[in-house]
Amino acid sequence: MAGGMSGAARFLSMALVVGTLAGCAGGNTEPALDTFTAEEIYKRGEVELETVARGGEALLYFQEVERLYPYSEWAKRALIMQAFTLHKTKKYEEARVASQRFLDFYPGDEDAAYAQYLMALSYYDQVDEVGRDQGLTFQALQALRVVIEQYPDSEYAKSAILKFDLAFDHLAGKEMEIGRYYLKRGHYTAAINRFRVVVQDFQTTTHTAEALHRLVESYLALGLTDEAQTAAAILGFNYQSSPFYDDSFRLLKDRGLAPEAKGTNWLSTVYRQMIRGEWL
């Protein structure tokens, strides 16, 4: 509210705005919000936003600011608050639309980084379990990467990096889940394909050690000892303190084998790259 207005006057002003919208909801076709300033309507939206249950009401105020005062500074603020309100009320697709509108209208604004971050969150916050469609995870990674690369000095970059790592780990977890499913049912080739993706494409995640161990299990089941020994060698070099290495070592030892790079296969290439640094 403008400076100097008394508490009673502010209360009366807010009450009038609420009454106006209530009348609109009751069937009036033309709300009288144009009798209030952009700042007054905007701040009423902020008040309503304090209660999640009233997020819809808050959104209406922010939308009215943009409609009634489209070229004002308050309209710009109202647009980013629309994106925030929609995200807060879990209307993720609509939040992305509002965020993109802000980026389209105000690409150089100081809140552009936040708009991009909100867009990324609208994907990320839907990635709530490993069993979901992973398309959302890929989209979250792409949107988070934009925050990291285009706004590296913003206050959102650090959070975006953390969420990027978690989403990346999430994708590896999905591959592991499917791989374990195949392994348990004796579909060893299908399992190997999944574990291979983790080792080659998700080396920095928390799932790599297990993926290597599951490769040892799968290759031994197929009688491919060179691959099994090489997978164990990589596991031992990078994760020797892991219980997965102990399990792999015992599996090999029971067959008179030891962890070492053997033969010419995709794992021997990984071994040369990771251990010897021989990048082609």
Image: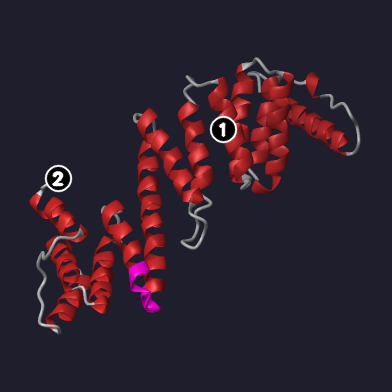
Q: CA distance from mark 1 to mark 2?
A: 42 Å
Q: Which mark is residue 234?
A: none
Left or right of 212: which side holds 255? left
Left or right of 59: which side holds 138? left
Pinpoint residue 77: horizontal percent, then vertical percent. 59, 25
Report the quarter where the C terminus lies.
top left
Q: Which mark is residue 99?
A: 1
Seen at 79% across and 24% down, the residue is 33
Compare residues 173 and 261 and report the one nearer the observer.
261
Seen at 64% across and 47% down, the residue is 52
Residue extending furthest top? Answer: 71
Q: Secondary structure at mark 2?
A: loop
Q: Which of the 4 image quadrants contains residue 81?
A: top right
Residue extending furthest right? Answer: 27
Q: Residues within 10 Å of mark 2 (few under 14, many from 20)?
A: few
Q: Residues within 10 Å of mark 1 (few under 14, many from 20)?
A: many
Left or right of 232: which side holds 103? right
Q: Which of the 4 image quadrants contains residue 70?
A: top right
Residue at mark 2: 279
Q: Which residues are magenta?
A: 183-190
Task: Give the residue type at disc 2.
Answer: Trp
Callout 1 touching callout 2 (CB < 8 Å) = no
Seen at 75% across and 25% down, the residue is 9
Say if 115 sits above or below 266 in the image: above
Left or right of 114: which side holds 206? left
- Say which of marks 1 and 2 sits in front: 2
